[in-house]
Amino acid sequence: MRTIATETWFTFTLIFEGIALAGSLGLLFGRAAWLRWETRWLEPKYQAARGFLLQALEADTDQREDLEAVTALPLRAQIKLMTDLGENLSGSKLQELANIAKQSGILTHGERLCRSRWWSQRVRGIRLFTAMAEGEQILPSLFHDPSPLIRSELAHWAADHPSPEMIDAVLRLLDDADGFCRFAAHNALVRMGSIVTEPLARHIESRTGVALEHAMAVAASLGHERFNDPARARLNHADPTIRTLAIATLGKSGGLRFVPELLDCLNDPAAHVRQAAAHALGRLKCWQASPAVARLLEDSVWTVRQEAALTLRSLGAPGILLLRQSLSNPDRFAGDMARHILGLPRIRVKGEAA
Amino acid sequence: MTHIIGEELLNCLLLVEWMILVYFFFLSSFYALLLTSAVLDIGPHLQKERGENRRRLLGSDIVPRITLLAPAYNEAKTIADSLRALLGLQYPSLEVIVINDGSKDTTLQVLINQFELVPVHPIYEHRLQTKPLRALYRSKLHPNLVVADKDNGGKADSLNVGLNIASHELVCAIDADTLIEPDALQRIVRPFIESDTVVAAGGTIRPVNGALIKGGRVVRVHTPHRLLAGVQVVEYLRAFLFGRLGWNRLGGNMIISGAFGLFRREAVIRAGGYLHDTVGEDMELIVRLRRVGCESHESQRVVFIPDPVAWTEVPESFRVLGNQRDRWHRGLADVLWRHRRLFFNPSYGALGLVVFPYFVFGELLAPVIEALGLLIMGLIVAFDDMNGSFMLLFFPDRVRIWHPAVLRFFGHRGIHIP
C-alpha cells in the first residue's frame, strides 16, 4: 500500500469539511423549524390581531380587546403590524391607530429602538414612526446620524412634517455625500411642494459647486416663480450643468419675460445647454423664437437638432412652416431632421438601390 | 523493468495529482473568501430592505427613467403574455421596447393585433451600427410600448437597435423568455441612485422549472420535478449568491447575466454597445465597460444585488444542458482571450490582478483540471491502492454547494418549503 505522509492532514481536512457540512445543515434545518413555528403559531395570531385592529378602526369600538390581541404578539410582530397598517392609512384612522400604538406601548418601544446603538434597530424605529406619522420629539435629533440609510429614512419622514426646522434639515441633506440620501431629500422636498420655495431660494443663494447643482435640480423639479431670479443669475454660470438646470427652471415657471435670455442660451458652447434652451422655448410656446430655434437645425450635435425640430413642431404653424422650409436647406442634416419630424419618407441618395 | 516503469509512472501521476490538489486548495480558499464577502453583504442588505416602503419610490417624479429592451425571435406563442407581464412591472417611468429580430413566424402580427400597434416615423440617432430597421411601431393601448421590426441579426444586434432607440437614461436588457418579479426594477435601480459611478447592475436569476406561472408571472414557487433541473437550482444559487455577490467587495463583477441586467445607456453606447461576433456578448460588454473605465481613469462600477429575481427556464435534458454549457464555456474562453491584455496587468487594478486571473484559473480551467484529476485518480486506483482520504478530497463541490443554499434560506425569499 502506498503510504502518504500527510494522511493525518487529509483526515483533518475531511473532518473539518464534515463539520462545516453538518453546521450548514444544522442552520438550514434550524431555520426551517423556526419558519414552520412562525407559520403555525405566529401567523394566525398576527392575522387575528390585524383583523381586530381593522374592525376597531372601521367601527370605532372599544379598544381594550384589540389591545390585548396586539400585545399578545411578540414585540417585533407588533411593530410590523403597526407599520404595515400605518402605511395604508391616513387622516383620523391613522391617528386612531397611533393612539392604539401609544396605549399598547409600541411607540415607547419605538423610541428605544431609535436610541439603539445598532443602525438596523434605529431604522426599524424610524420606519414605525414614519408609518404612524409621529416622532416629532425624537426623530429630529437623528438627522446627523452616521448611517446614510437613517438620514434618508428621516428625509422621507420629514416630507410629512414640513416645519421650517425640518425643511432646513432636509435642505442640508441635499449636500450629503451619499447619493441615496440626496435622492431622498430631493424627493421629500418635491413632496412638500410650494412650502419649500422660500427656504430653497435662500439655500440656492448660499451654495456653490456641486451643492448648488443639487439645489438647482430641486428648483427645476418644483418650477416656481420664486426661483426665476436665482435661475436667471446662473444662466452664465461656469458649469454647463447649472446653466442647463437654470434654463429648465425658467422654462417651467419663467414666462415670456425671460425669452431674450433663453434666446442667448441657444448659442451656448455646451450642446446640452442649447438643447435645454430650445426645449424651454418650446415649453413656453414662444412662437416668436421659431427662426432662432430653426437655426439649431444646422447644429453639429444630433440631439440638439432633434430638440430644435421637436420644439418647432410644438410651436404650431410658424414652427411647421420653418420645418418645411428646412427641407430645402443646403445643410443635409437640417433637411434630414426636418423630414424625420414631419414624418416624410426618406429621400434616396444618388446611387442608392431602391 | 516493466515494474520499474510502472512505479515511475505512478510517481508521476501522484505528483500531478498533488499539484491538482494544491490547485483546488487555493481555489477552495478563494471560494471561502467569496463566501465570507457574500455573507458580509447580504446581512446589511436584508436589514435595509426589510420593511422599506418602496411605494414612496413608485410615487416619485424624480426616479431614473428605465427603458426595457426585450429582443424577440420567433416568439409568437408566448410574446403577448410575456409583454403584458413586462408592461405590468411596478415602476413609475418605464418604456418597453420589443425588438422583433426578423422573426419567421407571426411574432410581429401578434404584437400588432394584440397591442394595436401603429407605425411611427423612426427618429433616433444611429449611434451603434446595426442591421437595417424595417419599421417602428407604437402601441395605441400602451403609449410606453415601442416595437422595432428589423432584419435578423442576432440578440446582440437587437439590443444595439434597442440602445439606439431607447429614450431613457437606464436600459434593462432581458431575454424574451425571462419572467421578472413585479418589483424587481424598483430594487435594481437603487445602486444607480446611490452612486453615479455605477454603470451596470445585475440581480439574482432563478430557475422557473416546477413553478406555477399565470399571465407571465410566477405565482407559486416550487422545486423542479426533475433531478437535472433541481441540481441547477442549487447551482444557480451558488453562482449568484456567493459567486457574484461575493465579488462586490473583491474587485467587482465581470458578468451580468444577459437574462436580466440594468445598464447606464450612455456608458454602454460609449463603450461601443454589444459585440455581434461573440457568444458571450453579455460578459464581453461588462468586461469592456470596466476596461474602458480603467483606461479612461473613470470609475465604472458593476454591482450585483441579491434581491431582484428574474426567472428563467433551465434545460431538463443532458443534450440541451450540454449545448448550453458548451456555448457558455466557449463564450467565456472567447471573452478572456479578447481581453487577455488584462491578465495580471496592474494598470487595471483589482480587475487585472484578481478578478480576471480568477476567471482564467477558477472558471475557465477548473473543469479541465477537475476532469484531469479524476482521470488520474482513476488510473492510480486501477494500478494501485490509494489513500481513501486523498480520494475524498477530490470532490470539492460537496461542501461548498450547501453554503449558498443556507445563505439563500436565510434571505427574505427562502427556498420554498412544501
Image (cartoon, coloured by chain):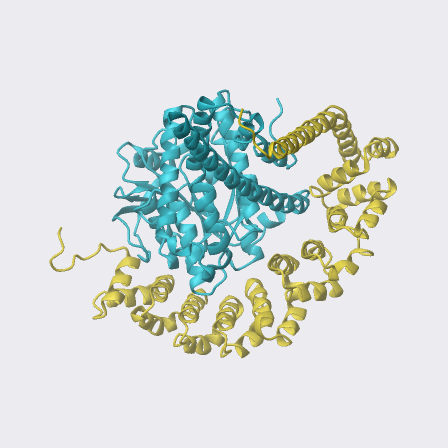
> x, y (%) of residue A176?
65, 64
- The answer to whether residue B228 is left or right of residue A195 is left
Q: To which quarter of the image does residue A10 belong?
A: top right
The extreme front residue here reads B1
- The answer to whether residue B114 is left or right of residue B65 is left
Q: Residue at x 80, y 51 (%)?
A: A116
> x, y (%) of residue B380?
46, 27
| Chain ID for yellow | A
> In which quadrant of the rendered image does the N terminus of chain A lie?
top right
Total numbered badges shown on the rendered structure:
0
Q: To which quarter of the image does residue A98 belong?
A: top right
- The answer to whether residue A44 is left or right of residue B107 is right
Q: Nearer the viewer, residue A115 or B204?
A: B204
The answer to whether residue B79 is visible is: no
Q: In this view, does A261 lie above or below A199?
A: below
Q: Residue at x 86, y 32 (%)?
A: A68
- The answer to whether residue B47 is left or right of residue B285 is right
Q: Which of A19 and A85 is in front in this view?
A: A19
> x, y (%) of residue B345?
44, 58
Q: Which residue is drawn at 52% across and 54% down?
A: B64
Chain B: drawing colour: cyan
The extreme top residue here reads B225
Q: Is residue B272 above or below residue B375?
A: below
The extreme left residue here reads A351
The answer to whether residue A110 is visible is: yes
> x, y (%) of residue A294?
32, 70
Q: Which of B180 and A6 is in front in this view?
A: A6
